[in-house]
């Protein structure tokens, strides 16, 4: 577990450096989800860094809230999908590391362009159904923002997944209570998200997304619940900007890059564990 925490710290360093280097990007949600991505790519998923687009006989992950691409790119690079030095090209001209993940650049690990909020659930369901049709036993994972649940397509997809018993799907909601315009409760209050997923026919779990022990335990429990006729949803409580005190719980850091002084303050709080790119 100590190794996973060390990886998560390095991923957080990558995030703030990438966004600072581009002078644009989305650090808040990326920092909050660093523990989840670390657990997923370094412990939970059966995946192959020697990337093939079809993803046969391996677990798949789809990022629906594509604006948190910095954490996704860092996790992929640190897991061996591409050279970590490429992280320095984030959001630069002709980079494969676009602000939102895209397939046009053929970046290993990216199977769908994302960032048009609400669409990732439908994509993940389609991938999960294809696994079933191919008699594969692997699992499809997806991640969504709580603000993203404002999109109606999400709720149509939830109904579809439950009705068609897509029970090889584990979808996680980053329940950080923040979106670009402010607290989710003020922008569009969705009430108790877990109860809504349950009402739509999903098996639900809940976890502290910034406690590595709990993240790995709950993800493993979710895997054990697959194959029981219901899709699985995890309500993941995180702190936006986790690890950088002046960014934490502040929606203003949803999509703002730190300046030079703020970068140094952030890096001072995040131990360098694997070596910076």
Image: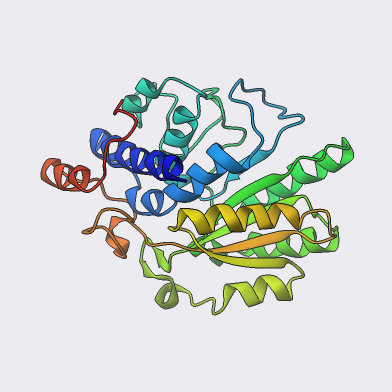
Residue 61's x, y, as percent? 62, 41
Regarding residue 151, the answer to whether it shows in the image is: no
Q: Is residue 164 left or right of residue 216?
A: right
> How many marks can you see?
0
**Could you say which is closer to the camera, residue 270 or residue 91?**
270
Name the residue rendered at 46%, 36% in the picture. Answer: 75
Name the residue rendered at 85%, 58% in the picture. Answer: 164
Residue 144 appears in which quarter of the rendering? Answer: bottom right
**Could you say which is closer to the camera, residue 248 or residue 119?**
248
**Could you say which is closer to the camera, residue 174 or residue 180?**
174
Residue 181's x, y, as percent? 36, 65
Residue that lies at the very extreme toward the front in this rendered image: 2
Please tell me whether residue 21 is drawn above or below residue 230 in the rendered image: above
Name the residue rendered at 41%, 45% in the picture. Answer: 5
**Could you say which is closer to the camera, residue 212 or residue 226?**
212
Regarding residue 68, the answer to whether it shows in the image is: yes
Residue 17's x, y, as percent? 26, 36
Residue that lies at the very extreme toward the left in this rendered image: 261
Q: Is residue 128 left or right of residue 243?
A: right
Tell me the quarter of the image containing the C terminus. Answer: top left
Residue 245's x, y, as percent? 23, 58
Q: In this figure, which colouring scheme has been used for the structure?
A: rainbow
Residue 228 appears in which quarter of the rendering? Answer: bottom right
């Amino acid at each position: 577990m100590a190794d996973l925490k060390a990886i998560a710290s390095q991923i957080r360093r990558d995030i703030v450096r990438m966004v600072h280097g581009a002078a644009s990007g989305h650090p808040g949600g990326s920092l909050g989800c660093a523990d989840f991505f670390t657990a997923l790519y370094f412990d939970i998923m059966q995946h192959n860094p020697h990337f093939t687009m079809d993803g046969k006989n391996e677990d798949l992950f789809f990022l629906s809230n594509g604006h948190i691409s910095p954490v996704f790119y860092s996790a992929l690079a640190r897991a061996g999908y591409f050279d970590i030095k490429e992280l320095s090209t984030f959001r630069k001209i002709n980079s494969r590391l676009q602000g939102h993940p895209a397939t046009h650049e053929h970046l290993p690990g990216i199977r769908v362009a994302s960032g048009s909020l609400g669409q990732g659930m439908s994509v993940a369901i389609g991938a999960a159904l294809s696994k079933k049709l191919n008699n594969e036993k692997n699992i499809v994972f997806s991640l969504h923002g709580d603000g993203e649940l404002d999109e109606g397509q999400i709720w149509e997809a939830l109904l579809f997944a439950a009705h068609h018993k897509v029970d090889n799907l584990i979808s996680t909601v980053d329940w950080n209570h923040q979106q670009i315009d402010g607290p989710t409760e003020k922008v569009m209050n969705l009430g108790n998200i877990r109860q809504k997923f349950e009402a739509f026919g999903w098996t639900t779990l809940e976890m502290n997304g910034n406690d590595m022990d709990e993240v790995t335990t709950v993800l493993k429990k979710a895997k054990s619940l697959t194959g029981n006729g219901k899709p699985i949803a995890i309500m993941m409580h995180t702190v936006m900007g986790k690890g950088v005190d002046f960014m934490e719980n502040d929606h203003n850091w949803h999509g703002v890059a730190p300046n030079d002084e703020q970068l140094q303050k952030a890096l001072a709080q995040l131990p360098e564990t694997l070596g910076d790119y």
